[in-house]
Every structure is written in C-alpha cells, then in structure tokens.
Image (spheres, rainbow, N blue to C red):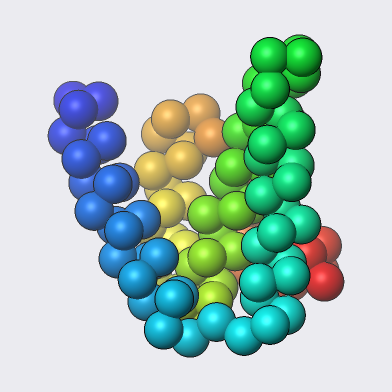
C-alpha cells in the first residue's frame, strides 16, 4: 500500500540523513543548499511546475545518498521514486550536474 511505502521511505530517508550527517564536508553543504533552493522555489504556490519540484526534491534526496556513501541507498530510493512517478536520477547524473 502507499502507506507502507511511505513508512518505509521515511525510515530509509531518516537513515540516509543520519549517515550523511556523519560524513558531510563543506562542499556537500554548499551543493545541498543549491539543490534546496530549487526545492523551495518549485514548492511555492507561485510555481506551476510539479515536475520541476519532483525533480529538485529527488536530486536533494539522492545528493544525501551520495554524501552517505552507500550506493544501496541510491538504488532503493530510485526504485521508490519510480514507483511514485518520481523521475529517477543516478549517481552519475548528480556527480556531473551538482558540482
């Protein structure tokens, strides 16, 4: 069910954040802030782009996966995003576009 998926996602994303918080550096914080600006921009009522919000939100969460350093997190969250209609991004995309 969607509730089961939401519960699982909440737990996985919580673990990702905790792990990333133990490993981040100044560059990681800078890159997260950059992505978070887009999340905020596209989440406002003025924005008409749900697609851009989902895209930026996905980038934010997958950037956290990169910081956490465990590629399994990326694979699991990509699978969840695909099942929710989120646009999947892989580690290569983020490495090229978030620097």
Give the x, y percent position of residue 60. Answer: 60, 53
The percent coordinates of residue 57 (x first, y second) are 59, 42
Q: Is residue 37 visible?
A: yes
Is 98 placed left or right of 63 in the picture? right
Q: Say if 50 sits above or below 90 in the image.
A: above
**Residue 43 versus residue 9 in the image, above or below:** above
Q: Is residue 17 left or right of residue 92?
A: left
The quarter of the displayed image where residue 91 is located: bottom right
Decide: is 28 above or below 83. Answer: below
- Is residue 80 shown left or right of residue 54? left
**Residue plotted at (38% across, 66% down):** 16
Tell me residue 45's x, y (percent).
68, 14
Quick check: can you spot residue 70? no
Residue nearest the observer in this picture, 83 or 10: 10
Q: How many marks?
A: 0
Query: Residue 24 in the image: x percent, y percent?
Result: 55, 82
The quadrant of the picture occupied by the N terminus is top left
Question: Left or right: where does residue 51 sit relative to residue 17?
Answer: right
Q: Residue at x 43, y 30 (%)?
A: 84
Point out the image quarter for the C terminus.
bottom right
Q: Residue at x 77, y 14 (%)?
A: 46
- Give residue 40's quadrant in the image: top right
Q: Residue 63 or 36: which is nearer the viewer?
A: 36
- Identified at 75% across, 33% down, the residue is 41
């Amino acid at each position: 069910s969607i509730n089961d998926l939401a519960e699982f996602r909440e737990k996985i994303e919580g673990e990702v954040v905790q792990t990333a918080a133990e490993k981040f550096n100044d560059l990681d914080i800078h890159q997260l802030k950059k992505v978070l600006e887009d999340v905020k921009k596209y989440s406002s009522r003025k924005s008409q782009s749900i697609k851009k919000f989902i895209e930026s939100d996905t980038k934010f969460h997958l950037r956290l996966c990169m910081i956490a350093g465990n590629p399994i997190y990326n694979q699991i969250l990509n699978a969840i995003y695909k099942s929710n209609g989120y646009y999947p991004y892989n580690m290569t995309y983020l490495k090229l576009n978030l620097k």
